[in-house]
Structures are given as C-alpha cells and as structure tokens.
Image (cartoon, rainbow, N blue to C red):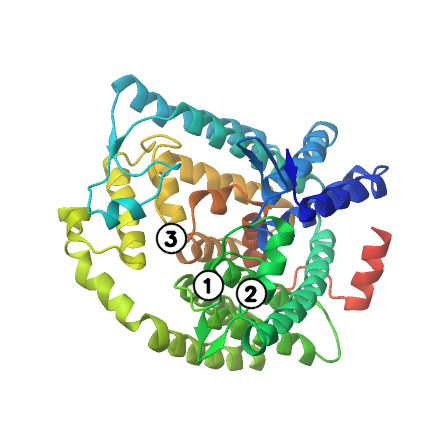
Amino acid sequence: MTITIGGIIYIVILIVIFLKNRFSLSRMYRAFFELAVLTEFLLNAGYVAKLGNFTIAYNYLSSFALFIPSLVICIEYRKKIPSRMPIISLLFLIELFIGVSFSTLTRTSYQGVPFNDNYDSYFVYGKNLPFVSVDLNQFVNMFVRFVIIITNISAFSAIYSRKDFAITANHFYKVGRFVLFIALIEFFFDNFVSDSLIRSLLFSIIGESGYFLPRQFLNFYSPLLASYEPSETSFVYYFFALVALFQLKTANTKSNEKIIIYFMLYLLLLVTTGALTSLLLLSSLLLVIIVYLINDRSYFAGACIIVGSILAFLVIITFFSNRINNIFYYAAKFNYGVASLPPVSEIIRIYSIYNVLMHFFNHPLFGIGLGICFSFGALPTLLCNIGLVGFLLWISLMKASLSKFSFSRASYLVSFFNFFFILFFFGYHMGEMVFYERSFFILVMLTYLSCKEKRLPIQSRANLNKNAMKA
C-alpha cells in the first residue's frame, strides 16, 4: 500500500470534519457536500492511496464520505424528501437494466470504444473501431455510482434550504479568492521562474506522475492549478465565475466592485486556458449573463457581455479558427470510418460523438445499455447508454430534488438547456455530468441565476457569514 502526502492531509481533513460535526447530521452532510464539490473541481488529478492495482482517487473518496451521512439522512429524514423522488429514482434504476437486458439477450454488439479504452490508438493506427458488447463489470460500477449520487442528491433535497445554499456559495466565494491568489502565484513562477516548478511541486504532493505544461496565451503561460490538462482548469475558473455572479445577485452590499473584479479575473483566466472546452464554458457564461441582464437590468451584465464577446472572439481567432475549419472539412468523411480521418484532437472528439449518436438514433427509447461505449460528449454518451426514457427520468429526478427552491418553469428550461446542451453536449465524459456533486451544484447555480425574482431573502455577506457561524 502506498499513500501520498496529499492523501494523508485529505484523510485528516475528513476526520476533522467528522469529529467537528458528529453531533449534527445536517451540518456533517453540508460540510462533506462542500468538500466533495471542491475536491471534484480542484483535485481531479492524483490519488489518495493505492492498494495493489486499486487506486483511491480524491473524488471517489469524497463522494463515498458524503454517501454515509446521506444514507442516514435518507432514512431519518425520509419524510422531508419530495414524495416523487423515490418513485422516479426506482423507475430510473429499473430503466438502467432494460437496455443492458436487451443487448444481453439478443447478444448484440456495437461499433464503438468501451469505457476502459480510448479513441486515440485507433486514430493513430487508422483502425476502425471495434465491436463491443455488454460489460457486466462496467455496468455494475456505473450502476453503483448512480446509486451513490442519487442518495447524495436525495439527502440534499431533504435538508438544504435557500439559506444553506447561499451559505455554501459564500464559502465557495472565499475559496475562490484563495484559488485566484494561487493562480496568480503560479502565473508569476511559470512565466518568470520555471514553467514546471509549481506543477512538479503540486503533483508530487497529490500523487500525479504526469502532466501537461501550461499553454501559452499571447506568449504567457496560463495557470493550470492542480489539473493535469487545460480543459479541467477552465472548468474551475468557470465555476468560481458563476459563484461570483451568484454573490452579485443575492448579496445586498453598498459596493460590488470587488465581486466584479473577481468575476472579470476568472473570466480572463478561463479564456487563457486555450482549451477547446473553454469555448463551451464561455458560451454558457454568456447565456447566464444575458439572462441576468434581462432579469435584473444590470449595467454590469451588459458590460460583461461586451467584454466576454471580445474575449471569445480573441480565443476563436487565436486558437481555434483552423481547428474549427478542420471539423467542418472532415465531418463529411465520418461515414467512411476512422481510417479516413486524421488523429487530431477535435476530429477524434466530434467523431466519437457522431458514433454514439448513431447508436442512439437506432435505439432511441432505452439506449444500447449502460457501460457499453462512450464518447467525448457527456449528453450524447448518456443518450446512447440509457436512451431518451432514461434521460427524461434523470431530468425529472434533478427537478424533483430542487422542488423546495420553487424555481419557475422558465428558470428550469433555461438552466437545463444551458447545462445539457451547451456545457455537456460537446464536452466532458458522461460520468462528469451525472456522477459528480460538482455538476449537480452547477445545475442548481445555473437554475438560480436564471430566476427573475430574487427568491433568496436579500442579505449582506456579513449576515451570511454570521449564519454560517451559527450553522
């Protein structure tokens, strides 16, 4: 057994949280929930410990630590869980078996790449994708992950109120300022001392052996934090930009200049990551800002739209003009298979999405079965694996978990479109969209920011801090 320095520190943090909140189940849940969200954003590389061939990742440990109080809450506070959630959860879990059962009984195989493989090797050697069938081990693994996240979300629906959510967002706002400080330190070292010093130090602590060097934007290296690739770092900056917008919408202060400055810095760092994913995240932010402008009539939002549009244009011209042209050029050749396509990142990603969508169109209701094959688009992979019925049940489950917040239908419509069709259609893996607490928190945040009315009682950050102390 091997354990990293970061793993020891993380286990100590878990023990401290448990001991500090052992007399209050709801406080323990909120503390572990916040830790899980931050862990999934900031520690997606490295590992806590290794037991032979089994690796304990930070995000898996955080979800499991949250699962324990969540399970107790679901039992003790079961009457506070929305009545339709258990029914929808049961129907959803039953639905997961339908596609797998059909593919198993008919012994059908599908051309694609399984979850434990990758597309790169097939493109590099010009080989067509293999035919894959039901993988029971992968199915069980993903089924258990669904059970864990459903339990964690059910506990959220039982004990989280608007005030709790505001307190959590305020905690994340403070963490965001610290992350911004670390990013600025890394920016200085990467550009003026060594482009690998900070990365080597961080990764030696958390246990990650390999990493990408920071990408250059206008001849400057962009901070990667503890992520091993720019797309994950861009999601970190996107998250804290949303938190800053939430603070601006809900906190009643005499001066919001600091929040605006923090937001613009997160937006700038998001753009400079140079990842294709940053375009999706920037598009999502612009939609949030447009809705914010319409609902709150804020001059700040209007200025951000202009600045954000300029930044988006700069990113497209600097990084992606040739890559986007390549996508349109080679898309016409997708029907001829992998052998006719170059081993280029964006082509691989778009072709993988095209491949699973073809399976979805052939099996639209229940999909081909959970855990058979994947793509680099979270939503297309979900549709391929569990079909339209499973997708609609999942949306119903998310909506039911937020019933206490009494969001309007328009808010759900805007936020779900933003979440599923902008954030997760062309980006990330299916697991990152449905298995992680961070994605659930993003969905809640997007829905709240789509509200026209300020449903949360207006209060100052000082009052939020006072409530946090009491909680």
The type of residue carrying mark 1 is: Leu
Is 252 above or below relative to 243? Answer: below
In space, the residues marked 1 and 2 are separated at their CA atoms by 9 Å
Is 69 above or below relative to 246? Answer: above
SS class of the residue under badge 1? Answer: helix
Q: Residue at x 77, y 67 (%)?
A: 461
Residue on which disc 1 sits: 281
- Of residues 352 and 157, the one nearer the viewer is 352
First in residue order: circle 1 vs circle 3: 1
Q: In the drawing, does residue 220 fall left or right of residue 69?
A: left
Residue on which disc 3 sits: 425
Indicate the position of residue 75 as horizontal and vertical percent values: 71, 27
Disc assigned to residue 303: none
Residue on which disc 2 sits: 237
Give the label, 3 or 2, closer to the camera.
2
Q: Residue at x 19, y 57 (%)?
A: 331
Whether tag 1 and tag 2 are in contact, CB under 8 A, the answer is yes
